[in-house]
Amino acid sequence: MRIIVILALGVLAIGAAFLLFSPNVIRGSGPIAATNLSEEELIARGEYLTVAGNCASCHTTSDGEFMAGGLSFATPFGTLYSTNITPDPETGIGNWSDWDFLNSMRHGVRPNGEHLYPAFPYTSFTKVPNEDIAAMFAYLRSIPPIKKDARTNELSFPFNMRALLGAWKVFYFDQGEFEFIKEESAEWNRGAYLVEGLAHCSACHTPRNFLGAELARQHMSGGEYFDRVGSGSFRSWAAPNLTPSKRGLGLWPQSALEDYLKTARNDFLESFGPMNEVIMNSTRYLSGNDITAMATYLKSLPIIDEREGVMPDSELMGRGRTIYNLHCGTCHLPTGEGDPEMAPRLNAGSLVVQAENPASMINAILYSPETPGHPLTPRWREAMEEFQYLLDDEEVAAVTSYIRNSWSNRAGLVSSEQVALQR
């Protein structure tokens, strides 16, 4: 594996040298888009679009000031920190021009010409048209400026060399505005623009290669990334399959998907973990028409089925059933159907339970699923307890395997080694 990485980096370095590490930027004067909106209307539009892009979740820490940056992102290449995007002239974007902001969104380039790391999802934001970029910039210029220096990224060599991203972009970055598909409805196109552009859903829900680029052939079929669990430590999470497969979004009618994006809840379950921020900071504020458009588009995606897992034997299922009946069955019921007041449904309703990668389900069992909380009223009578101190790795693997392969579920077994990785 190390040899492959070295060879790949060599190819990228040669490509970068060929391009003289030169980013593709646009230099212009004046506004980047014409508008008939008043300044107040432009700012309001920009606020809506910035919320749709969920910018606050990445650029605001839990104890920090709005959009002042500093949030850490654990990656296979090291730790990155989000930047200050308030209009402070020294530490934020106060001295940026419209064109500087456009180049960051469309081309992934700083005003000084340096490449931005794609943890900032310009690979999706590139689809945002000029008029929307102008509105977002107008809004960001209107928020209170905060003086806060960006933290220094902690990346290993050679990934700390921004110039190499010039070659990465040649292989993995398709820049350009979203193009409407004439054969599809206006609703479908609006949903496609939001899902693939501003909302950048693929950033979490698409698998990546060893250089961090999304795998186009597995688009929206489920991804893996690092985020925090309840203890505050970083662990792997598995974003479920958003194609309408029988173990992905095919489990839900479109109305359930719309409810989930708008309220963090539907008849099957309640949001938990990293998805809470997406819903609570972004999608719940979107209009009903936009939520319907996003759901319409997602339900239209080509089906990418999960790989069939190895089925657990009767001994493992029996052990898992015993643990389930002791610790889980009272709330989730012996049938796995859940209870409207006690616990969510586990049978044929949870994309996390059915996911090919069990990481998120293991996290929920070990650390307890963090639900959205305020301002939502608690849905369940009692919060689920964490089992990291009650069950060992083999016991967690057994009960997880039992749930994933009981009733109508067929997701494959979970090993104690997989549990140990999450622990």
Image (cartoon, helix red, strand yellow):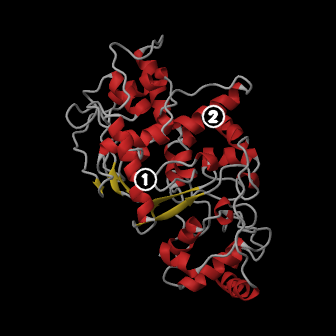
From the viewer's perspective, is 390 left or right of 40? right
Looking at this view, name the residue that lies furthest to the left.
90
- In the rendered view, would you say 365 is above or below 79? below
Distance from Cα at disc 1 to Cα at disc 2: 32 Å
From the viewer's perspective, is 359 left or right of 81? right
Residue 152, horizontal then vertical, whole percent:
24, 51
Say whether residue 5 is visible: yes
Which residue is disc 2 drawn over? 192
- In the rendered view, would you say 221 is above or below 175? below
Q: Which structural element holds mark 1? A: helix
Q: Residues within 10 Å of mark 1 (few under 14, many from 20)?
A: some
Q: How many marks?
A: 2
- Is 21 in front, or is 68? 21
Amino acid type assigned to the residue bearing label 2 in the image? Ala
Which residue is disc 1 drawn over? 8
**Corner quadrant of residue 362:** bottom right
- In the rendered view, would you say 406 is above or below 227? below
Question: Closer to the observer: label 1 or label 2?
Answer: 1
Q: Residue at x 63, y 76 (%)?
A: 414
- Is 344 in front, or is 141? 141
Residue 216, horizontal then vertical, whole percent:
59, 45
Q: Residue at x 76, y 74 (%)?
A: 406
- Is 211 in front, or is 95? 211
